[in-house]
Amino acid sequence: EWAPKNVLFYGPPGTGKTLMARALATETDVPLYLIKATELIGEHVGDGAKQIEQLYSRALEDKPCIVFIDELDAIALSRQYQSLRGDVSEVVNALLTELDGIHDNDGVVTIGATNNPEMLDSAIRSRFEEEIKFELPKDKERLKIMELYRKKMPLEIRADLRKYVEKTKGMSGRDIKEKFLKPALHRAILEDKKYVDERDLDAVLAELNKSRREAPLHLYR
């Protein structure tokens, strides 16, 4: 049965791309090699290309396995978005070699992740046989995410989280945890409270909305 060897995960930050790669490795009981593309940009020309070669060499020894390359656009932007430096160009060429399977990479599945697929170099993007889109959570999903983290928090949340479904629109799962619920928890702890209530949640949202209004306009362009 055919299965893609190279898969591209794309979508906004915090939507679970890395989490899905971890879950796939756990579910299939195979090793996961996880690297951020930014780590492949070394001080010296050739460093990143060597890292790619060493990464896939280790992966081949451990196959079947998954290689997960996060922030792929850090090294594989289309030339219209950046002029490739020599070291980045060498990394891209080394990655293309591995994605093409020239070194007989059977048993090694490569998953690339990016927030901006349209900005990827066409040569790199064309090597991925399948693309999977990760979207921001919808209303019901945001409520489920809040309820999930509610169970894991050290303090009880005494609030009807359904009230915050609309107010968290546009947030990723990571945003809900890191920018909404955790700050509300810290606020309650600082006030020496035994629970998180609506005042804490509302205060965090007010701060978030204020910071968005005050953010420089260029961040939204």
Image (cartoon, rainbow, N blue to C red):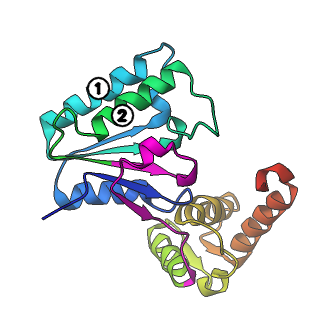
User: Which residue lies under the disc numbered 2?
Assistant: 95
Q: Residue at x 28, y 40 (%)?
A: 100
Q: Residue at x 44, y 68 (%)?
A: 152
| Part of the protein shown in magenta | 111-139
Nearest-to-viewer mark from 2 and 1: 2
Of 89 and 67, nearer the camera is 89
Question: x, y (%) of residue 133?
Answer: 46, 65
Q: Earlier in the sequence, mark 2 or mark 1?
A: 1
Looking at the rendered structure, the secondary structure element under dot 1 is helix
Looking at the rendered structure, the secondary structure element under dot 2 is helix
Of 150 and 144, nearer the camera is 144
- Crowding near the residue tagged with mark 2, few <14, some 14–19, many ≥20 C-alpha atoms within 10 Å: many
Question: x, y (%) of residue 1?
Answer: 12, 65
Q: Residue at x 56, y 41 (%)?
A: 78
Q: Amino acid at mark 2?
A: Leu
Question: x, y (%) of residue 147?
Answer: 49, 78
| Direction from residue 180 to residue 11 in the image, left or right | left
Q: Residue at x 50, y 34 (%)?
A: 75
Of 200 and 38, nearer the camera is 38
